[in-house]
Image (cartoon, rainbow, N blue to C red):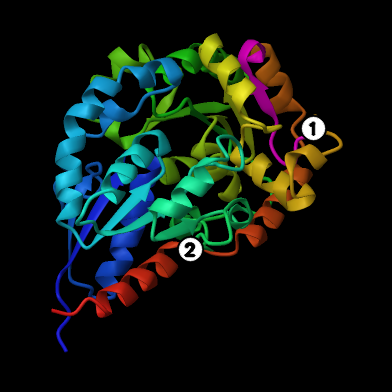
Amino acid sequence: MEVKTLKIFVCALEYSSNIHLFSLIKILKQKQINFTLEGVFDSLQRDYKSLFGVEEFRVMGFVDALKLLPKYFKIRKVLLQKARECDIAIFMDSSSFNIPLIQNLFKSNKKPYIIYYILPQVWAWKAYRAKILAKICDELWGILPFECAYYPNEARISYVGHPLLDTLPFSYVCKRTTNLIAFMPGSRVAEIKALLPVFKIVATILKKQNKQALLIIPKHFKKQQLERIYGNVEEFALSFDTYEGLRDCEFAFVCSGTATLETTLLGIPTLLVYKAKAIDFLLAKSLVKLNYIGLANIFLEFFFFHSPKNNPSIHNFPIIPEILQQNVKPHILLKEWEGFDYEKFFSQKEVLMQYLKNGSAENCARKIEYFAKNLLK
């Protein structure tokens, strides 16, 4: 019996979400599933056309997010209409944007099968969202082994694996000396401008120790005016490919977010560096009940202690040191680099790999394939 073409709606605003979406699309094509793709996603999905550009949605902090509200209300109507025309709607990350959209879609007389992939961090803050998502979503695809415990029993939630394990081209298991050090100040203009001046000073000092500095720039900035975003970067060699750039690096100074988990899983010894607007940092600190901001540290803390509140020594980082706010100064970064515990890093990195188990694209594609086979013409 012939299976109809599956109409898929996707809302993927984050750069990292689009990398994971690309992996999922690749597997769907390998399985020869007939599908169309609608929604919001970036140019990485080059075979499909997004309804809106996503770069303008990528903001940093609470204050900047407020500026998006007028634009959100204008485009919501278009997105809802497109989603209603599809069989499946997959929402990825970006919970502040996606949850209100799903709530409106849930109320519709005609709605698609709603899936949330890369769930909001209800284990960190806004725990009430777990009940909301359990009610308005048909399926929840978790990418963290401990997520399921934070959702009600009636939630249709499953751990599908971690998507970063789908994309790793290498993973080092011991210290290497290449004299090349990576600097990754982020993918948002605000965080780049906050970290890059400090990174430039560190790069200049490291050069005197025969270390070459490599600045890794997100691909979506390649066609933009780099000088406007980064200023003078003569201290660095440049790379627009994260994995190729990191392949020959012995160490990395990295902004918070998915990038620190990425470098950790690649086996690149990492120092997390984070500096935001004071008001954003204070608000986040008051709302988020976590001991760390680095995902690798957070995941390992859950693995060892099951909850942040059970950790008896929060100043002993599980795997990578975190340098935050007023401590983001060249001499502090250099001191942490010089005293880095490589043995601890690589032993804990292996624990993390075993904890996450496998990638998610194959499992997600299998679920979609099952749905498609039951959607007959």
Mark 1 vs mark 2: give the one in front: 2
Query: Which three-letter amino acid code belongs to the residue tagged 1?
Result: Ile
User: Range of the magenta residues?
Assistant: 316-328
Q: Nearer the viewer, residue 195 or 63?
A: 63
Up the image or down, 122 lies above or below 185; here it is: below
| Residue at the spot of label 2 | 156
Residue 358 locus on image (x, y percent): 54, 64
Q: Mark 1 touching mark 2, by CB under 8 A?
A: no
Left or right side of 116 for 126: right
- Asked if 234 appears above or below 176 in the picture, the reply is above
* Residue at image point 71% right, 56% down: 351
Task: Give the residue at x 53% y 62%.
Answer: 154
Give the mark nearest the N terminus, 1 or 2: 2
Q: Check residue 104 for magenta coloring.
A: no
Q: Nearer the viewer, residue 231 or 375?
A: 375
- Number of numbered discs: 2
Find numbered disc 1 in the image and state the secondary structure of the residue it sits on.
loop
Residue topped by disc 1:
314
